Amino acid sequence: MVHIDITYLGSLRCEAVHGPSGAKILTDAPVDNHGKGESFSPTDLAATSLGTCMATIMGIAAEQHGVALGKVKVSVDKVMSTNSPRRIVKLEVAFTIPLPPDFPKRKTLENAALACPVHHSLHPDIEQVVRFDWVG
């Protein structure tokens, strides 16, 4: 179990403190939802969690298989609903992997990313589109 303390700071901003490390992050409501948009919104963090989780699990698999993964880039585009209730309707994740398209462990690494806990924790109504670009 991990404990996180959250304090509402006013003006639609929160501070979250990660119990084990003391690391802090701020969230802010987005401009299109009454906020200033000066930091990640809570739904931005959900999108960020998906991308970082997938990259992390891919990295674990790479280490287990002796693969030098290099600097993998991940971009995530979040699409919000246009009607009520306000929610994430689509997350598009694009990996740029500095290894050749015919890399022997390609499927192993892709399957590892797709097995990440966040990917499996998101509501099934959220469309998740994942693309892997092997560019080495």
Image (tube, rainbow, N blue to C red):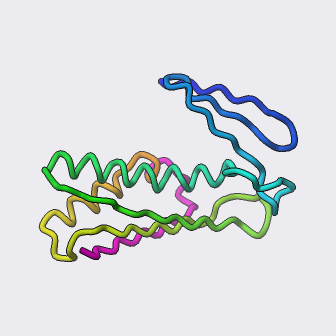
Number of numbered discs overlaid on the protein picture: 0
**Going by the image, does 26 lie left or right of 19?**
right
Q: Residue at x 55, y 23 (%)?
A: 19
Residue 90 position by quadrant: bottom right
From this view, report whether residue 131 is shown above or below residue 5. below
Residue 8 position by quadrant: top right
Query: What stretch of residues is rendered in magenta?
Result: 120-136
**Going by the image, does 60 lie left or right of 89?**
left
Outermost residue, front side:
71
From this view, report whether residue 106 is shown above or below residue 115. below
Query: How far across and how far down the image is residue 78, in percent?
Result: 60, 65
Query: In front: 69, or 33?
Result: 69
Q: Is residue 131 found inside the magenta-colored segment of the image? A: yes
From this view, report whether residue 41 is shown above or below residue 21. below
Query: How far across and how far down the image is residue 124, in percent?
Result: 52, 58
- Work out which quarter of the rendered image holds the C terminus and state it: bottom left
**Going by the image, does 105 lie left or right of 80?**
left
Q: Is residue 41 found inside the magenta-colored segment of the image? A: no
Q: Residue at x 49, y 23 (%)?
A: 20
Q: Residue at x 87, y 42 (%)?
A: 11
Query: In front: 10, or 115?
Result: 10
Query: How far across and how far down the image is residue 115, in percent?
Result: 34, 52
Query: How far across and how far down the image is residue 23, in percent?
Result: 56, 31
